[in-house]
Amino acid sequence: MAIIYSYPLDNTPQLADLLLGTSISDGDATKSFTIGSLVALVDAPASVGTVTSVATANSTFISITGGPITNAGTLTASLSAGGTPNTFLRGDNQWAPATTSGSPNIEVFDEGTSITPAAASFNFTGTGVTATNVGDAVTVNVPALVNGVLSVNPGTGITTNATLGDIIVTNSGVIDLLPGDNIGIASAAGVFTVTATMNAGTVQSVVAGDGLVLQTAQSTITSTPTIGVQYTGSNNYILVGQDLAVVDGNDIIAFNQTSSSNVKSTTISTIPIAALPLVQTYIDAGDADTIKSNTDNFTTTPVVTNVITLTQAEYTALTPDTSTLYVIAAASAAITTTLTPVTNSISGSAANYTITGAVNGSTFTGVAGETYLFTTIVTPNAGYYFSIPVNGNIVSGTIAAGTTTVAQALTGTLVAIPTPAVTATLQVVTNIQGGPSSGFILGDSLTGAVVTGTSPLAFSFTTTCAPANGYTFSVGPTIVQATGTIKGSQTVITTITGTLQLAP
């Protein structure tokens, strides 16, 4: 076989040229291979692809050098424009300075709407905007805004149709300010002052309690009340203050002293009898025929305190008492006088009073000429009294021969001690600020509601308060309900406080 280097040398091999080699996969047979197949075999493991050469081409404005590349190389791109590089690259791929000739095709917009697609010139107008030049260099000066409105954004209660441009501002909140109950509004230079015109203090109402009364019709519970002592009705000061007790001589009572027209006081025990002429007359009449020994000033004998009439035999049979005067008289026939018949004409149920003392069938024994006395005691039961006093309960006279019976006729009117009806009448007092009376609604127990019963009367009212449509309570409402116990008819108060505001 010829030696390889003995063949002529080809310095420009082609991909289709052949080379000799041994095919291992074909039993070590000698075969020929193209240079291109060997190149493909070498490139295949590197997954380079099928590109075997990269060529270059120039565009209108770009020139590329360095190609074609078949294995490795560098590509260089550069502008192909002619002329000396300047500020502007003209459309014909020439470097050139800017000129005023030609159309710049600048489109001008106003608020996003096109005015012209190709502006020919600009004219700067308007206060504060200036345009100056140095040669062809133009300077436009737009001064900064001083307190200028850039945009309008609505706050609470205000609405706008836009935030920029031609803006319409509308009040969507308070459109008027009117004073409600107990509210005053004053304005000066656009400044409004709201003041409460109700009570300067904290007293919301004054009512008459037990034993008291508003004295005049002009007096009200919320302003200028005039309170006085109640003398009439179920709320009079004695009836509501009753606490029954047995009077004592040292107890004090009040009275009007006529000589001074002043209220004075005294004790029961110091009331002179002359101040009670009717009582004095009653006592004196009862003592008119009574034997008295108040003129016995002798000290040699005992003072007589009792007088007894009897016969000599009766006197002899007893041991005399030194303080008793014994009158010995001739014996007379004893005559028994009986209290019968008894006519009971008392008006009222007999079950509500008790009769003691002399009753039907009671007797008195004496002699002719002697005075007899029957005393009947009629006592009303608890809860009753005699509106017309009992009459005919005392029967007296002189025993006469043959007198055996005397009659008694009881009269009088018994009635129950009145328990006056007690009425609690409700008055609702409101002190609600910030809105008119139409801004809230009261419910349940309202002014004029009543609770009636006997004394002492327990009462309780429940009043509700809610905001009306368009209002809300910023404070409260705080309700102090009328509740308690009274002894006499009177007005009772529920108070409501709070602050209203317009609903958001």
Image (cartoon, rainbow, N blue to C red):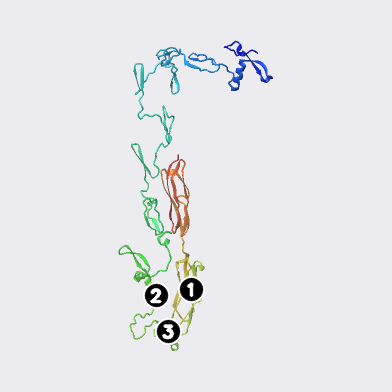
Query: Which quarter of the rendering shows the C terminus?
Result: top left
* The label number, if any, that marks residue 286 in the structure image: 2
Q: Residue extending furthest right? A: 27
Q: Where is residue 3 in the image (x, y as percent from the top left)?
A: 62, 13
Please say if 141 is above or below 432. above
Marks 2 and 3, the one that precedes in the sequence: 2
Residue at mark 2 to residue at mark 3: CA–CA distance? 22 Å
* The label number, if any, that marks residue 309 in the structure image: 3
Marks 1 and 3, the one that precedes in the sequence: 3
The residue type indicated by label 2 comes to: Gly
The residue type indicated by label 3 comes to: Thr
Asked if residue 503 lies left or right of residue 8, the reply is left
Residue at mark 1 to residue at mark 3: CA–CA distance? 28 Å
* Labelled pair 2, 1 in contact (Cβ < 8 Å): no
* Labelled pair 2, 3 in contact (Cβ < 8 Å): no
Q: Circle 1 is placed at which residue position?
A: 356
Comparing 404 with 299, the one in front is 299
Q: Residue extending furthest top? A: 8
The residue type indicated by label 1 comes to: Thr
